[in-house]
Image (spheres, rainbow, N blue to C red):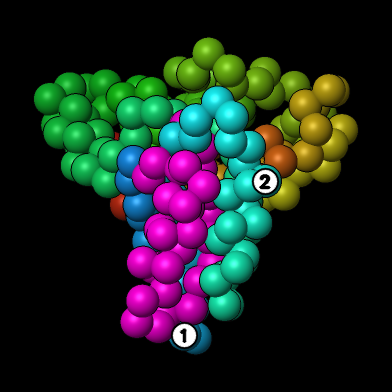
């Protein structure tokens, strides 16, 4: 599966035109999520399956034939994502209230199209993490900075050796913090940070 993050005008037929453009080159759209919209434009995430002979660049070129459309980001993503995933995560947290923070960490990479997630205390000690989460070395801690509010952080290529540029979002879970990360991008939009904040608050409750 691939994630295509697409900017498109909020005009009648624009979304359908993008879907048609993807379909014309053999892309099969599995899910669509509206990430943000403002000033007459929207940013949508398309979860797309491509046949072996079709490259992502072909889909990008086809989308860009639609007036006002720009593909902002393409990356591989989880195949089992659905627009109901937030509700499923909430139900899982309610089923295990004592482990709600751990449940959110396990679900977060899928929910936020991210590479990893971790629950840490204020001293960066890992309480729970996905398999691909980094070790928070002193250098990594310095790059991330103070855990003080819900925000995203752009990290340089040397924040962890051989990891490359990354973007991390953070939110409080009680006295602890959840961190989610994407290698390379795309950036976490304000609407995604709001979702992370709400889910983290529910995990605390």
Question: Which residue: 49% across, 30% down?
Answer: 51
Question: Which residue: 49% across, 86% down?
Answer: 39
- What x and y, as percent, mark residue 139? 81, 29
Question: Which residue: 77% across, 26% down?
Answer: 163
Q: Residues within 10 Å of mark 1 (few under 14, many from 20)?
A: few
Q: Is residue 123 magenta?
A: no
Q: Residues within 10 Å of mark 2 (few under 14, many from 20)?
A: few
Q: Is residue 15 above or below residue 203?
A: below
- What x and y, as percent, mark residue 145? 71, 44
Question: Which residue: 53% across, 13% down?
Answer: 131
- What x and y, as percent, mark residue 77? 50, 33
Q: Quadrant of residue 185?
A: top right
Q: Report if residue 123 is visible in the image.
A: yes
* Residue stretch rendered in magenta on the structure: 1-29
Circle number at residue 40: 1
Quadrant of the rendering where the C terminus is positioned: top left
Q: Is residue 25 magenta?
A: yes
- What x and y, as percent, mark residue 180? 53, 36
The single residue placed furthest to the bottom in the displayed view is: 39
Viewer-nearest of labels 2 and 1? 2
Nearest to N terminus: mark 2 or mark 1: 1
Give how far apart the Cα atoms at labels 2 and 1 are.
26 Å
Task: Give the residue at mark 2.
Answer: 57
Q: Is residue 166 left or right of residue 19?
A: right
Q: Report if residue 151 is visible in the image.
A: no
């Amino acid at each position: 599966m691939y994630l295509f993050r697409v900017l498109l005008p909020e005009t009648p037929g624009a979304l359908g035109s993008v879907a048609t453009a993807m379909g014309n080159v053999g892309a099969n759209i599995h899910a669509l999520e509206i990430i943000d919209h403002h000033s007459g434009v929207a940013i949508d995430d398309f979860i797309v399956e491509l046949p072996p002979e079709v490259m992502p660049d072909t889909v990008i070129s086809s989308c860009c034939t639609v007036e006002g459309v720009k593909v902002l980001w393409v990356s591989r993503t989880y195949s089992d994502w659905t627009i109901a995933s937030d509700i499923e995560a909430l139900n899982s947290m309610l089923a295990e209230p004592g482990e709600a923070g751990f449940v959110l960490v396990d679900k977060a990479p899928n929910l936020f199209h991210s590479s990893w997630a971790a629950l840490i205390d204020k001293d960066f000690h890992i309480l729970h993490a996905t398999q691909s989460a980094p070790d928070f070395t002193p250098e990594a801690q310095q790059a991330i900075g103070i855990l003080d509010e819900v925000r995203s952080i752009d990290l340089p290529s040397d924040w962890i050796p051989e990891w490359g540029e990354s973007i991390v979002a953070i939110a409080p879970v009680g006295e602890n913090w959840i961190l989610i990360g994407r290698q390379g991008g795309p950036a976490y939009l304000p609407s995604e940070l709001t979702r992370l904040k709400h889910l983290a608050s529910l995990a605390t409750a």
